[in-house]
Amino acid sequence: MNKGKKKPEKAKMGTAKAAVGPQFEAVAQKAAGVVEPVLAAEGLELVLAQFCPEPGGPVLRLFVDRPGGVTLEDCMAASRLVSDLLDVYMEDQAGYRLEVSSPGDTRPLTKKEHFEKFRGSRAKVTLAQPQNGRKNFTGRIAGVENSTLTLACDGGIVELALDGIAVARLCRSKGEDRC
């Protein structure tokens, strides 16, 4: 019996992801919708929101960035900025811990704009469903057109639908050139 509740939609590429299940992804999406405009007004980009169950209780992780990178002070200020707002709009999710962090050098790529910004960089992409029997691809971002990512890997070019990407991250820029 459904009693009017909407069935969660399949995950699509965006700023909200969860480690486990659609119920956690829905919480991450709600949090992203609440904090994204507030962070943007402060010059911060919400790269990714995650809501994950952990042994000490659920954690809401917000990965933020700005041109030139973020500092510890930026993350602390962002945490203070959104904490009360989240308490009001997410009162049904009591008991979670809020963490605000930089996306780091293996930053997640969650939007078309991220792939465009990091064109020429190495990335590891995992698809939700296999393409030609393969789900994992590592290579240089050659471009993005419409809703297709072009990745130069394995001596060739691979085209991947953006809405079929489960996870994408930049590869480390320092040290070893492998993902």
Image (spheres, rainbow, N blue to C red):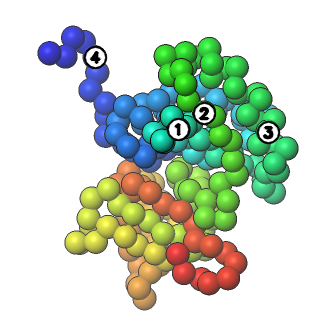
Question: What's the distance in space between the residues labelled 4 and 3, CA to CA?
Answer: 37 Å
Gap between marks 2 and 3 measured at Cα: 14 Å
Q: Which residue is mark 2?
A: 97
Badge 1 crowding class, 10 Å Cα cut-off, few under 14, some 14 to 19, many 20 or more, is few
The answer to whether 152 is drawn above or below residue 34 in the figure is below
Tag 2: Cα neighbours inside 10 Å, few (<14), some, or many (≥20)? some
Residue type at mark 1 is Gly
Label 1 SS: loop
Q: Is residue 110 above or below residue 42?
A: below
Under mark 2, the amino acid is: Arg
**Which element carries disc 2, helix, strand or loop?**
strand
Task: Measure the C-alpha gap from mark 2 to mark 1.
Answer: 9 Å
* Residue 62 location (% of width, % of height): 62, 41
Task: State if disc 1 and disc 2 touch (CB < 8 Å).
Answer: yes
Verify CB contact (< 8 Å) between mark 4 and mark 3. Answer: no
Where is residue 53? Give x, y as percent.
45, 39
Mark 2 or 3: in front is 2
**Residue bearing the label numbered 1:** 56
Residue at far right of view: 73
Q: Earlier in the sequence, mark 4 or mark 2?
A: 4
Reading the image, the residue beneath label 3 is: 76
Q: Give the mark nearest the N terminus, 2 or 1.
A: 1
Q: Position of residue 140 (x, y in %)?
A: 53, 76
Which-is-in-front pick, marks 3 and 1?
A: 1
Q: Which residue position holds label 4?
A: 5
